[in-house]
Image: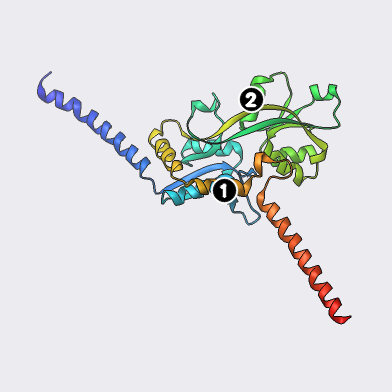
């Protein structure tokens, strides 16, 4: 091979290398990060009555934006849609999910956000025979579905698009058992007024909730991991304290709800005090 031919061979290789370096640089220099997650996954991510996203993960990624001088946008849908958005590139990162072999085929995983425990829940009225044979609710696309199909292949499952629909089905006696993490199940069991009718039958696993990007976006993932480390620890502590009671206490799930209850109690006491003063002044 003469020198000219060698140069001609090297030129396209150089162009490919330059394109790769340029893409990695663009990934690391993003000024806006699009985060995907579930729209019905309280207290982690959900839509408020005004249609705006809120929750623990929403606050955490908002703090990420502040710490890294970036704009953060949220795309919320069903659990399966959140995976599809990251996979297709519509979103840059999944806000937090469990590792699985199936997902690892199209996702690369990064930092751990928090550890999370998942349980099998059943109606307290079930007999032993019913508990062993009843249909179990899972969320389509969520790790719970993959886990149950792998570890309990003989159990009959019913897939729902979201936790809200699944636990509402329990309240309507459509299903009698389901799989979910403790904070989310506590919220919806309280919402549908069936908390005292359902028991945690079995702890299935505790796993780290981790960030993830589409497979191959390694430069972006490294950038995100570095950015998460920049969030001040006091901010992380405040956000967790805002949304969770210690150890996901069974007495509640949201600190804001506790704060509202306390405020109402203070107002009631103050009102009664004023009324008593008025009566005394008339006496």
Q: Residue at x 43, y 40 (%)?
A: 224
* Side of 80 relative to 253 (left or right): left
Q: Residue at x 62, y 32 (%)?
A: 142
Q: Nearer the viewer, mark 2 or mark 1?
A: 1
Q: Residue at x 22, y 31 (%)?
A: 14
Q: Which mark is residue 147?
A: 2
Residue at the extreme right of the image, as rendered:
283
Q: How is the image coloured?
A: rainbow
Give the camera-side residue of 277 and 254.
Answer: 277
Are the residues at dot 2 and dot 1 in contact (C-beta closer than 8 Å)? no
Residue 240 appears in the figure: yes
Q: Which residue, given by chain and number where applicable, does mark 1 sit on?
A: 239
Residue 57, given in percent of the width and then of the height, sits at 56, 44
Give the camera-side residue of 55 and 159.
Answer: 55
Find residue 2 and report its image quarter. Answer: top left
Q: Which mark is residue 135?
A: none
Q: Residue at x 43, y 43 (%)?
A: 227
Earlier-in-chain disc, 2 versus 1:
2
Above or below, 272 relative to 154 = below
Residue 102, given in percent of the width and then of the height, sits at 55, 25
Could you tell me which secondary element the residue under label 1 belongs to? helix
Could you tell me which secondary element the residue under label 2 belongs to? helix
* Image quadrant containing the N terminus: top left
Residue 116, given in percent of the width and then of the height, sits at 61, 34
């Amino acid at each position: 091979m003469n020198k000219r031919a060698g140069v001609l061979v090297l030129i396209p290789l150089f162009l490919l290398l330059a394109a790769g370096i340029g893409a990695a640089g663009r990934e690391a220099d993003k000024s806006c990060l699009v985060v995907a997650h579930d729209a019905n996954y309280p207290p982690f991510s959900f839509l408020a009555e005004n249609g705006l996203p809120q929750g623990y993960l929403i606050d955490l990624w908002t703090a990420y934006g502040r710490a890294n001088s970036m704009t953060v946008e949220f795309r919320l849908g069903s659990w399966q849609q959140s995976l599809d958005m990251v996979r297709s590139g519509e979103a840059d990162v999944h806000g937090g999910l469990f590792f699985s072999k199936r997902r690892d085929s199209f996702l690369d995983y990064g930092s751990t956000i928090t550890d999370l425990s998942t349980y099998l829940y059943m109606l307290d009225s079930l007999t032993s025979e019913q508990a062993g044979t009843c249909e179990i609710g899972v969320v389509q696309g969520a790790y719970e579905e993959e886990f149950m199909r792998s570890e309990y292949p003989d159990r009959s499952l019913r897939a729902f698009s979201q936790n809200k629909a699944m636990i509402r089905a329990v309240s309507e006696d459509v299903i009698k058992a389901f799989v979910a993490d403790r904070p989310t199940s506590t919220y919806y069991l309280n919402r549908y007024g069936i908390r005292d009718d359902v028991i945690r039958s079995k702890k299935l696993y505790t796993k780290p909730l981790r960030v993830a990007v589409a497979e191959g976006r390694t430069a972006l993932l490294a950038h995100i991991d570095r950015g998460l480390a920049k969030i001040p620890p006091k901010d992380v502590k405040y956000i967790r304290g805002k949304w969770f009671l210690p150890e996901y206490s069974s007495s509640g799930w949201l600190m804001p709800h506790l704060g509202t209850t306390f405020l109402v109690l203070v107002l009631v006491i103050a009102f009664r005090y004023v009324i008593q003063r008025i009566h005394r002044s008339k006496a």
